[in-house]
Image (cartoon, helix red, strand yellow):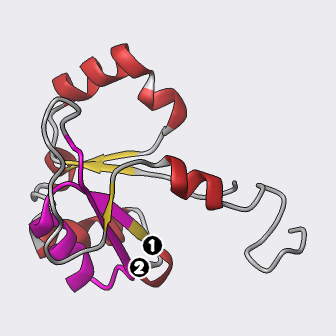
Amino acid sequence: AGKDVRIVTNAHYASIDITQHALGIRDAVPHFHTAHDLGHAKESAAFWQALATRHPFAPARTLLIDDTATVLDAGRAHGIACTLAVTTPDSGGPPRTPQRHPGIDSFASLIDALPPANMSAGGTTR
């Protein structure tokens, strides 16, 4: 839908490679930013400052989805306007009840709500 989608992760490259092998995630989301590359964990304000310096983004127009409340808190403190807590980060475990951020258990509802790629939020073509 014309959105700039990025993955920010605390995961090590070995874990990213496993996910790539299993799901082809780098083919779907080519922009990865790791805590290792930025020198700070996502829970740190320094992570978000480093990310904004190296790869500018508009916090007021950003949606951050994570399964860790402290990561969502750090993103919100950096000015990220919309945060969602993943309620089912482990498909084998029970759903979690989000405490400080609205929850989501599936990306399907978000994807279904997006306008077509050739349409802006106002409904006109780009």
Left or right placement of residue 52 versus residue 5 in this view:
left
Q: Disc 2 to disc 1, how far (Cα)? A: 5 Å
The residue at 32%/85% (across/down) is 79
> Looking at this view, is 60 or 97 the one in front?
97
Residue 62 bears which disc, if any?
1
Please rate how many residues cluster around mark 1, counting C-alpha atoms within 10 Å: few if below 14, some from 14 to 19, many from 20.
some
Residue 28 in percent (x, y) is at 53, 33
Residue 47 in percent (x, y) is at 18, 65
Identify the amino acid type marked 1.
Thr
Q: Which residues are magenta?
A: 64-89
Asked if 21 appears above or below 19 in the picture, the reply is above
Q: Most extreme residue toward the front, as rendered?
A: 94
The residue at 39%/82% (across/down) is 81
**Residue 71: within the magenta?**
yes
Asked if 8 appears above or below 82 in the picture, the reply is above
Q: SS at mark 2?
A: helix
Quadrant assignment for the N terminus: bottom right
Q: Quadrant of residue 45?
A: bottom left
- The reply to whether dot 2 and dot 1 touch (C-beta < 8 Å) is yes
> Looking at this view, is 112 or 125 the one in front?
112
The residue at 41%/79% (across/down) is 59
Identify the amino acid type marked 2.
Pro
Please rate how many residues cluster around mark 2, counting C-alpha atoms within 10 Å: few if below 14, some from 14 to 19, many from 20.
some
The residue at 13%/36% (across/down) is 93
The residue at which mark 2 appears reads as 59
